[in-house]
Amino acid sequence: MFKKLGVSIKEFVIDVKTEVRKVSFPSKAETMGSTMVVIVFCVIMSLFLSVADSFLVWLISKVI
């Protein structure tokens, strides 16, 4: 039983090493560009949600 476990762990580690060699990491420019897109999107969404929340608060205050 333990012999099978050792063999399967060894095969797993070999497979992981093989897959890691296939990974392509983004360049610094790609990482910076993607980060800027995420930051801009977060700022835009926070502004939109703030305006929507303020409008809904105003609307509810008029109804009540």
Image: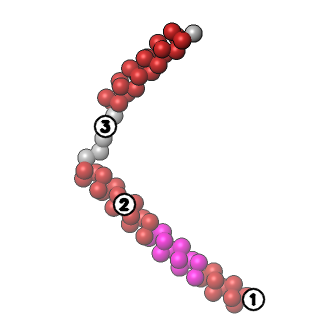
**Vertical placement of residue 27 versus 44, above or below:** above
At x 38%, y 64%, the residue is: 39
Q: Amino acid at mark 1?
A: Ile
User: Disc number at residue 11?
Assistant: none
Local crowd size for mark 3, using a 10 Å CA cut-off: few (<14), some (14–19), many (≥20)? few
Residue beneath label 3, please?
A: 24
Residue 58 in magenta?
no
Q: Amino acid at mark 2?
A: Val
SS assignment for the magenta stretch, majority: helix
Q: Secondary structure at mark 3?
A: loop
Q: Quadrant of the N terminus?
A: top right
First in sequence, mark 1 or 2: give its number: 2
User: Disc number at residue 37?
Assistant: 2
- The alpha-carbon separation of the residues under discs 3 and 1 comes to 57 Å
Residues shaded magenta: 44-54
Q: Position of residue 26 (x, y in %)?
A: 29, 45
